[in-house]
Amino acid sequence: MDSGYYAACTALVARTQALDTIANNLANASTVGYRAQHNQFSSVLAQASGAPDSDLNQAINNYGILSGTTLDETQGALQKTGNDLDLAVQGSGFFVVQTAGGPMYTRDGSFQVSAKGQLVTAAGDPVMGDKGVISMPPGSVSISADGTISTNGAVAGKLKLVSFPAGTPLTSAGETYYSAPPKTETAATDSTVKQGMLESSNVNPVTSMVELITAQRSAEMMQRELSMYTSEMDKTATQDLPKVS
Amino acid sequence: MFHALYTAASGMTAQQINLDNIANNLANASTSGFQSRRVQFSDLLYQSEVMPGAAATQQTTVSSGLQVGLGTRPGNTEIIQTQGDLSSTGNPLDFAIEGTGFFQILLPNNQIGYTRAGSFQPNQQGTLVTANGDELQPAITIPPNATNITVGSDGTVSATLPGQINAAQVGTIQLATFANPGGLNSIGNNIYLPTTASGDAVVGTPGGADGLGTIQQGMLEQANVNIVDEFVNMILAQRSYESNSRVVKAADEMLQGLNQVAQ
């Protein structure tokens, strides 16, 4: 059958998947430390094996699919909260969190002290320091730009900040946690910690709205194309052509 | 397909809860001893259609996977622990805590509750009670006709008894603190109850080195609600709700268009 029909179908599926990502970005526009995801479209040749008969054949068999989502690494805006245990990272660094599923990385620095006196994330997982889990004696907390934590003037630990080489695939794990392939983390040298602040989600509402409109209109075009095949060309083929005789 | 509808709905629900919380903070902007809360959101699970770092061929890996997130959820409402402004009331039985401690009060069910609202009055027996009639713990009884009630910054309560020249000590106010005050349970009337998240109360004398803070007589702590911040958050919540509802509309129109193709 007409390969253009399937090209339009594939593209329509890709646009609905793109809408899912855009919806997730907008839903997480208030999630502290959230990293926006961007859609990447790519084309696949329907007949990957063997050279196409002609350039024309290649053009009509080139299907557009959603091949991947990339994380936006830009810095989110820092918002002041005044809570001593709210921390924001300026730079590319991540906090390291010990979870049941191994180390996770997060930019969400809304930490608390657990009933056991450990520094934990909002989800209750311990935050890692240079020497493991950080125990916080009671008292007023001050945290310096390099992540050194002092309570009542005595050093309680130093936050571990790591960054990843460009192109390292980070996996979103929910709870604004990210996981990385083993042995890719390096000490973050370009990052500073800001106490009493949180990093807002780096979702850009303007870009997201433009992406939303583009996905919607582009889906409409595919729908129009599908109806060309189903209602106009096929109708002509099945109803009008037999009457020619 | 079309998670977008549910994802956007999760965003709208989250913003609704955010707005509820902002409304509560603003409604309590004049409640003395009130500590505002902030909703924290987290992202939900992801559908990983292609895992990042998966093998593309035997030699290469894909640099970024295809992960579709399923929305957001309100994770928790954290109590903001900043100190509220102290306002002078001139009433000798108004106490403000400058520090992180809480007053202990005896609730009608014999449980100990914790509060930062330090507006006390004597009941018929002269015992200091809150506006709801709950006794301050340890109980402090002001003898009848006592004058010049003075509370030191370390919680020592003294009063001049009739016929005496020197003030006599009638009790000591003690304060409690928690490992994680952000995890306390609010039960209304400015009262908090401890939870496993907050840890057990650590009781001590005010003014010490353990960070409980000092007691200021004749002062009340105002709510630590920052009106400007709350208004900014309210605008953000409203706009974010709108953009999520726009996604619902877009998904709806795409589905509608799809149904028309099939006709």
Image (cartoon, coloured by chain):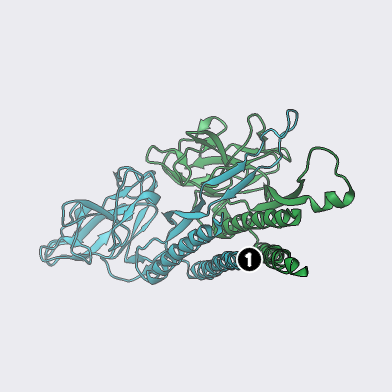
Chain colours: A green, B cyan
Which residue type does callout 1 highlight? Val
Q: Chain of mark 1?
A: B
Residue A21 horizontal/vertical position (percent): 61, 54
Quadrant housing the C terminus of chain A: bottom right
Work out which residue is located at the far front of the displayed protein and give it: A245
Task: Answer with left or right where residue A162 lies relative to residue A244.
Answer: left
Task: Answer with left or right where residue A224 lies relative to residue B256.
Answer: right
Vertical position of residue B47 compared to residue A130: above or below: below
> In the rendered image, is residue B29 in sight?
yes
Task: Answer with left or right where residue B134 lies relative to residue A191.
Answer: left
Residue under the image location 84 percent in, 50 percent down: A57
Q: Which residue is mark 1?
A: B261
| Residue sitting nearer the eye, A53 or B131 | A53
> In the rendered image, is residue A77 in sight?
no
Work out which residue is located at the far right of the displayed protein and give it: A54
How many marks do you count on the picture? Answer: 1
Residue A67 horizontal/vertical position (percent): 70, 47
Residue at disc 1, secondary structure:
helix
Residue under the image location 87 percent in, 52 percent down: A56
| Residue sitting nearer the eye, B60 or B198 | B60
Residue B137 horizontal/vertical position (percent): 21, 53
